[in-house]
Image: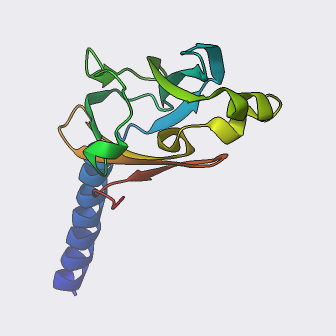
Amino acid sequence: MALAIFTGVAAVLLATAIIFIAKSWFGTQPRLRVRILGELSSSTAGGPDKIRCTWQKRLEIYNSTAFNALGVTFIWPKPALQLPVPRLEPPHVNATETRSLEFKIEKEFPREQVIACRDRFKELLPAELKTVALILKYQNDKGITFYTRYELNGETENSTFHRFRPRL
């Protein structure tokens, strides 16, 4: 009888210790959200029959938790699909902080095409801005790695959080 009571108490203490350790290590998970903001910012003459369009964009990274995200790095599916975003310096996002990285993309189009789309500039949107996919890799203060997968497809944005590296 005493052995059964001792075994029951030991099991409860062991389960409590495991839950406490798991919460202290994994419960401090920062969660980064990503958004891309901005529209066509300007268009200028690019030659006799060309117009150069410039998209000034901003990639925002928001830490929606009370835990710092350290060592934030970008993982792109292919170098050809990488946006011209500068590195995040310093490479961390503090609790409830928003960090912005500005970038621009310029493209030249035939003058007739731009004039035909003057009310529908979204048709001129460069391919690298129509579909964006990236992964943010970051750590909590205990050194545990977490990931945020961001996808933009047309007008649909999606940020998901992962404990293990997701596929792009």
Instruction: Report the front residue among 29 and 86.
Output: 86
Q: Provide residue 106's location: percent of width, then percent of height.
A: 49, 23
Q: Please name the colour scheme applied to the rendered image.
A: rainbow
Instruction: Report the front residue among 164 and 141.
Output: 164
User: Which quarter of the picture shows residue 3?
Assistant: bottom left
User: Which quarter of the picture shows residue 91?
Assistant: top left
Query: Which residue is the extreme one toward the bottom?
Result: 1
- Please say if 66 is above or below 101: below
* Side of 95 relative to 115 (left or right): left
**Residue at point 36%, 45% (across, down):** 81
**Residue at point 34%, 39% (across, down):** 82
- Please say if 56 is above or below 6: above
Instruction: Report the front residue among 166 and 31.
Output: 166
**Residue at point 54%, 33% (across, down):** 35
Q: Please state, as top left, top right, bottom left or bottom right, where the N terminus lies in the image.
A: bottom left
Query: Which residue is the extreme one toward the front?
Result: 48
* Side of 157 relative to 160 (left or right): right
- Please say if 33 is above or below 1: above
Q: Please state, as top left, top right, bottom left or bottom right, where the C terminus lies in the image.
A: bottom left
Query: Which residue is the extreme one toward the right?
Result: 119
